[in-house]
Amino acid sequence: MTANLTLFFVVVFLVATWMGWEWPFIAKMMPVYVAAIPGVLLAVVQLYRDITDWDKRRGKKGGGTEMDEVFMTGLDRRTERQRTIVFFAWFISGALAIWLLGIVIALPLLALLYALVEGRERWTVSLVMAAGTFLLIWGLFEYLLEMRWPPGALFR
Amino acid sequence: METSLFHAAVQGLLNLMQLKVFLAMLVGVSIGTFTAVAPQGLGMPLVYAILLPVVIKWEPLTGIALLIGASSVSAICAAYLPILFGIPGGSGSQATVLDGYPMGKRGEARRALGASFMAGGMGCVIGTLTLLAAIPLARPLIYLMGSPELFVVMLWGLSMVAVLAGRRPIKGLIATAFGLLIAMVGQQAQSGVMRFVFDQPYLLDGFAISIIALALFGIPSALDLALTKLGVEQQPAPLKGSLLDGARDTLREWWLVVRCSFVGVWVGIVPGLGSQVVDWLAYGHAAQSCKGAKESFGKGDVRGVIAPESANDAKDGGDLITTLLLGFPQGVVTALFIVALLAWGFLPGPEMIKKNADLIYSIVWIQGIAGITGTLVGFVLAKELARLAQVRYSFMVPVLFIFILLGAFSVNRDPVDLLVVVTFGILGYFMKRSGYPRPAMILGLVLGDLMEKYLYRSMASYGFSWLTRPGVIVLLILTTVSFVFTLRGRLERKTEAEALSGRAMARADDR
């Protein structure tokens, strides 16, 4: 997976270099000379390290601490993959629902269904969550702040 | 202190004497406290990313009060998860687990929490005082800086961020370069050239940083909760003992608090170091310098809680020194804070010191007052906050979904923003999984535009001769030296702090 993401970066930097090559100097200074070209070089080095399993072969990691959180769940691979797919399915469905139904309907519906189906909460708890979401989106934004949400694609 | 700065300091305090500003700060404190206590995965970057689209529509001081109020207390109450659940809390409180959890397990959870609140509050005050002292001291130096010097300072910071990207320097640099590239999307103001627009009107103005930050941090955070099913599959240590005992322990160890607070301030000032490092450095320092630490650390020594917690809170003061005085962010939170300041029309750095010194002092006052308020909240509401730490994932995940989608959609009310949040969310997940540091990408993204502006001004004013300015030469030498030395040091040895904390961790694991 690490090699795949590195390959993605190699491609992105190459495309950026190719696209920016004909731009005037002032326009390509940062994207091409500061970001894309050094990016390609570094990503190729990293790709070689990923493919040859460099870190493991060297038997040690460099010093220093982690800048970002480390991905570590302690779950077996199958459970982790299953939960990850379910999670993204919920999230993408939520985004699609906003597009189709509009945010005022979609988000309370998402809260209700997630709590009920995935979280196995009681009906009452799930309904309270949905109502709270509705109050936040409609009551606070639309009613108090007078911020009009666009209707969903199905209602236009 | 110079008279003008003194007046600015007084005016900065008077600015806060408005009900809405004060209320915004209190709301910020509540949000920061909830974030610190709430189950694993929530963090200040996510909170800033959620709040940003909302607060930039407010008037500046109210928005600043909310943001700074939240971030200044987020570390004070961050010890709940390490002490009660034995899992690292938000970044900056990870070392607390080594001694906090053993204390919790042996019925001293309240004592450990009391020590962490007190140490956090004291650390926050020390960090704020340092920030207060830094403004008049740094002002003459900052006035010497023009666009060329500021460009090199940012380059310096960015190179350090990438090098200090922990164990993965190359990945850090790649993530930074990728962030810079994303920042370049859209029509360039100086030349009018459309860069990476692909004939899409949506891309003309580039990506909204707040949406990308929401996606990169929000989705992996929510996924963490969904994966671990926190609150359902994990049970907390009992909330026993006395908070006041912990407060007394901290007061007795006041010198340790002062030392570790300055470690925190230093980490805040040095570009690229951040909350992922601060607690370990302070813990390592305490493990080296405290009497009998070699035997007791990792087994529930209260000093192992005091050291990281005081440093973690003092760091915020150090962070703000470079953020406000140089316009260079030290991490994701300060990077997003700069985005908010830019949206309000302030350019952090020399320009802001010249034109808006009172606002800088307002930020300092908010930082200090919110820190003290957060400490009091911790002591008064310890029991209630402990219940918050047990909120189930089935509640937290939909709440995060709602805020991420709402935050993204509210920026332009454009469905394409939803596509962007999903895409960058998936990228954030893969980056976290593959060890590409997301903070490096966010820093590249935020600084890309600023750096280009300074570089353009330098080239337009001086051509290539800006490279021969004395200030630029000095800063370039410093950049090169620190880059090479940091890389060399990183390659040659593991830090002493890590070795010490590693030993303590091994002892904690044995138990």
Image (tube, helix red, strand yellow):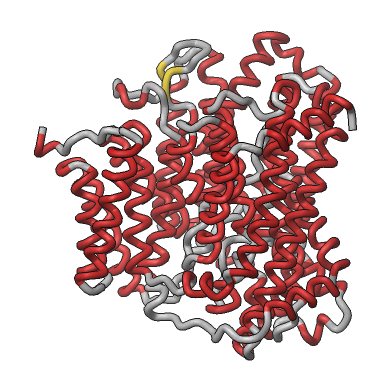
Location of residue B358 in the rendering, given as x and y in whole percent from the top left corner: 72, 30
Residue A57 occupies which quadrant of the picture?
bottom right
The quarter in which the C terminus of chain B is drawn is bottom right
Q: Residue at x 32, y 68 (%)?
A: B394
Q: Is residue B447 above or below residue B77?
A: above
- Residue B496 can be seen, yes or no: yes
Q: Is residue B221 above or below residue B333?
A: below
Q: Residue at x 63, y 90 (%)?
A: B106
Location of residue A128 in the rendering, given as x and y in whole percent from the top left corner: 26, 63
Q: Is residue B149 above or below residue A64?
A: above
Location of residue A82 in the rendering, given as x and y in whole percent from the top left corner: 28, 69
Location of residue B113 in the rendering, given as x and y in whole percent from the top left corner: 65, 74
The quarter in which the N terminus of chain B is drawn is top right
B335 to the left or right of A24: right
Q: B337 or B65, which is in the foreground? A: B65
B34 to the left or right of B18: left
- The number of callouts visible is 0
Residue B87 occupies which quadrant of the picture?
bottom right
Q: B219 or B485, which is in the foreground? A: B219
B141 to the left or right of A82: right
Q: Residue at x 22, y 61 (%)?
A: A112
- Residue B99 can be seen, yes or no: no
Q: B346 or A82, which is in the foreground? A: B346
A91 to the left or right of A39: left
Q: B44 or B18, which is in the foreground? A: B18
Q: Residue at x 55, y 45 (%)?
A: B23
